[in-house]
Image: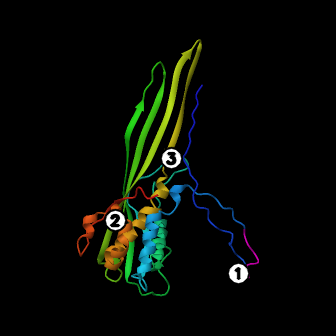
Amino acid sequence: MAAAVTLGGCAQGFSWNTSETDLGGPDRKIRVPVTKASMPSSVQPYPRIEATLACIRQTGVLRGKTFVVGPFADSTGKINAVAQGATGNFVPQGGSASYVTDALTKAGGQVVSTYFGAPTKAVPAQYAVNGISNSLDFGTSGQADVRIGGIGPTMELGWAQLSLSIQLDEVATRVNRQMSMIQRPVRYTQLGATVGKTFGNTLVTGSGNLQNQERLQLEALNGPIALGIADVVMKEYPRARAACLERIADLLIKDDYISDNPQSLATAAVTGLY
């Protein structure tokens, strides 16, 4: 007899308010009802980073500034062919640029998206923003399988470490203005028990596991990219840095902000944000 039980952790999160969903024009005579689905807490926008983007918007430093955003490149070279329902890359491909657009818009900037091609009409822009997923490493920090008399507990602790970079360039010359590098750990925990023992004339074998794994595809997007955008904008505009850095200063290299001309790489671990 063999048994396996897997439990994925989840928690209640935001419910999208779609009660005003409208496909009928200004008169709103035609509506499509959409259910309000609870989202896992890890999917919610990171409150501290969202507050920082809102703070940057309030400073007005990006008012009238236009950013050109292209595809977000995956340079990790890692392919996923083993996870349930996954047959492609571990991290999202060019569509990650939509999170760059979202963060810049929330910070008060205007965005020209080139993901679907160059615009048919030229738009004056000051900056180009590029993103790259640079590396993806996996490891196991702890593992145990202890059995006494054929019965005992099991434990496994694992992680994935993703690094990505956000680059702010002058759009006309491609001269780099600012750079931010972000590291995001994604954790995996499994606890369980196994049995392989003879009771009388009956052999009993099996295992049971409780598993909690953060989702790499999604955690590679929401918070880390927005943090990188906030970082390069605050480096470029001292007024925004002075007003808003305190909210996320512990996530960035503090020495990088002591200088009057912060040009070095900033590294952050997106943890403890909830």
Q: Check residue 220 in the rendering and tell me which mark sits there, or answer none.
A: none
In the drawing, does residue 76 fall left or right of residue 263?
right
Between 143 and 172, the one lying in front of the other is 143
The stretch of residues the image draws in magenta is: 26-32
Q: Check residue 83 in the rendering and tell me which mark sits there, or answer none.
A: 3
Question: Which quadrant of the view contains residue 141?
Answer: top left
Percent position of residue 167, x then y: 34, 71
**Disc 1 + disc 3, Cβ < 8 Å:** no
Within 10 angstroms of label 2, few (less than 14), some, or many (20 or more) residues?
A: some
Give the Cα separation between the discs numbered 2 and 3. Answer: 36 Å
- Please name the residue shown 31% across and 70% down the image: 179
Give the quarter of the figure containing the N terminus.
Answer: top right
> Disc 2 marks which amino acid?
Ala
Q: Nearer the viewer, mark 2 or mark 3?
A: 2
In the rendered image, the vertical position of residue 199 relative to residue 217, given as above or below: above
Q: Check residue 249 in the rendering and tell me which mark sits there, or answer none.
A: 2
Between 129 and 8, the one lying in front of the other is 8
Within 10 angstroms of label 1, few (less than 14), some, or many (20 or more) residues?
A: few
Q: Which residue is mark 1?
A: 25
Q: Assess whether residue 251 is covered by the magenta stretch.
A: no
Res 157 visible: yes
Res 114 visible: no
